[in-house]
Amino acid sequence: MVPTPVRRPRPTTELRCLPTFELRVGGVPVPLPHRAQRVLVFLALRAGPADRPELAGTLWPDVPASRAYSSLRSTLWGLSRLSPSPVIAVGSSVQISPEVRVDLEGARRLAQRIIERGPGKVATPAALAALRHDFLPSWSEEWLAAEQHHFRQLRLHALEVLSRHLSEKGDHALAVEAGLLALACEPLRESAHRTLMLAHLAEGNRAEAIWQYHRARELLANELGLTPSPEMEALLQRALRDGPAGPESPPASGTEAAGHANESASEPAARNGVLGGGSGTTAG
């Protein structure tokens, strides 16, 4: 009797782009030249196959078409020698293999779910890990810029929703962490400052909320020449008056809020905070 051969499972191929590029096959990193990395990222962003001329023209825009096509051909040949190959090339069309797991896609789906339906039963540590980083922030490719901006907006909105949800549940430490992640990514985003103020107030940390207001006011004034919104002024008034806060409420009169702000300016302005000192320079 001839023994039945044992089939070994194909190794898993993972493409990671958050925040840096890494291709892993069976858990082992696979070094690739930058041009091969660019091809894989371009294909990962496509919903379907890409035409070779489009791919070559997009990734090598500053060289003659014949040279760009030659560069693409040699790059695809190198990728096809990997086992398993992360790309499928048939005729003039090329696409990423459906077996490749792309971390960007998982993070996108998670962010959209949180924004549209709320966190629900999402595991908070896993969500924070998936939304912690931007999409290839060190890459400055023109064809990538729109996708980088889109993912950044997705993750920022999702982190704000997640932070507020965690505050309502009483998971204060994680609520603050989610707010800090959003703010570290975009220090001039007022909604992130408000979200962090709410997280501090829900935990009963009025001084932290007041300091966050003054940090936001300083950044907005120095970098954009703007003043805090009425919603943020209302949160300051609540911190000065009531302490713990639920959802944001309509602001009271501007005169009363301004009076409270002036009374409390000296202490918060002198403190060192999680986003840096008192200068107007934004964090990266």
Image: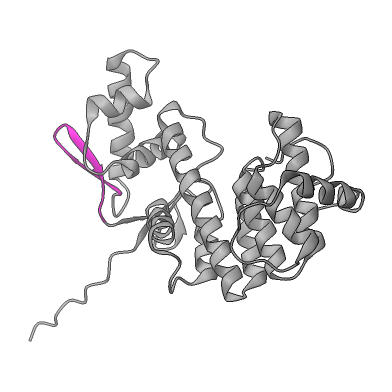
Horizontally, residue 106 falls left or right of residue 132, namely left
What residue is rendered at 68% in x and 69% in y?
202
Horizontally, residue 206 falls left or right of residue 55, namely right
Where residue 211 appears, as percent x and y from the top left, is: 80, 53
The residues colored magenta run 86-98
Where residue 52 appears, as percent x and y from the top left, is: 23, 29
Using the rendered image of the protein, determine whether residue 61 is visible from the camera's viewpoint. Answer: yes
Query: Which quarter shows the N terminus?
Result: bottom left
Q: Nearer the viewer, residue 265 or 10?
A: 265
Q: How is the image coloured?
A: one colour
Q: Please, what is the dominant secondary structure of the magenta stretch? A: strand
What residue is rendered at 50% in x and 67% in y?
126
What residue is rendered at 18% in x and 35% in y?
93
In the depicted structure, whether residue 34 falls above or below residue 154: above
Query: Which quarter shows the C terminus?
Result: top right
Where residue 31 appears, as percent x and y from the top left, is: 47, 46
| Quarter of the figure with residue 219 | top right
Using the rendered image of the protein, determine whether residue 275 is visible from the camera's viewpoint. Answer: no
Residue 87 lies in magenta, yes or no? yes
Q: Nearer the viewer, residue 17 or 114?
A: 114
What residue is rendered at 62% in x and 75% in y?
170
Q: Residue furthest bottom?
A: 1
Q: Nearer the viewer, residue 69 or 240?
A: 240
Where residue 282 appears, as percent x and y from the top left, is: 72, 38
In the depicted structure, whether residue 97 falls above or below residue 173: above
Q: Residue furthest top?
A: 64
Horizontally, residue 208 falls left or right of residue 150, namely right
